[in-house]
Structure formats: structure tokens, C-alpha cells
Amino acid sequence: MKTPPPETLTVLLRAWSRGDVAARDQLFSFVYAELRRRADRYLQRENPGHTLQPTGLVHEAYLRLSTQNPGWKNRIQFFASRPR
């Protein structure tokens, strides 16, 4: 799925912050590939022999993020943050 313009992601992040679960789901459908790429790059820096996979890391992050209402203001803040 092609990532929409940054403004669209910002609108979805703000809607999610207001409690719109459909906006959260749409946002993740747009950013999943980018999150997976970032997870892959991150895991390449881990010690050899680790058992984490990029897909599992993204899914774990989604599970943690989907239960929060973090109040992100824009996509830069979203991609820079880490799940609590």
C-alpha cells in the first residue's frame, strides 16, 4: 500500500488521539511497511543469534501502541517515539 502524504498521516494521528479507532487502523495500514523497514534496520545492529524478526517486532509494537492514546501531533513525532 502506498503511503499517503504526510498531512494525511497527521490527520489520522490526531483523530486517533481523539479516540477514533478506525483512524488508528487506517494509519497502521499505511505505515506498516515503513515500520517493518525500520525494524529490519534496527535488528541488523543486534548481536548475532538474536531471535527477533522484523515482523514480530512491528506486531508487538502495534499491540502496545493500539492500547494507548499517546496524543501524537504529527508523523515525525510518531516515527520518533518508542512504545511504552
Image (cartoon, rainbow, N blue to C red):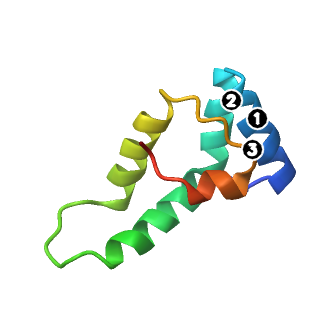
Instruction: Give residue 62's position: percent from left, percent from top.
Output: 46, 40
Kind of element beneath mark 1: helix
9 and 78: which is toward the camera: 78
State the residue in front, 66 or 55.
Answer: 66
Q: Which residue is mark 2?
A: 17
Horizontal relation, residue 65 to residue 71: left or right: left
| Quarter of the rendering occupied by the C terminus | top left
Give the label on residue 73, or none: 3
**Residue denoted by label 1:** 14
35 w.r.t. 19: above or below: below
Say which residue appears at 68% left-offset and 35% top-offset: 26
Task: Give the Cα separation between the discs numbered 2 and 3.
Answer: 9 Å
Residue kind at label 2, given as amino acid type: Ser
Determine the residue positioned at 81% across, 55% down.
6
Mark 2 is surrounded, within 10 Å at the Cα level, by few (under 14), some (14 to 19) or many (20 or more) other residues, namely some
Query: Viewed as shown, does residue 43 lie left or right of 67?
Result: left
Neighbours of disc 3 within 10 Å: few (<14), some (14-19), many (20+) = some
Q: CA distance from mark 2 to mark 1?
A: 5 Å
> What number is the disc on residue 54?
none
Q: Are marks 2 and 3 in contact (CB under 8 Å)?
A: no
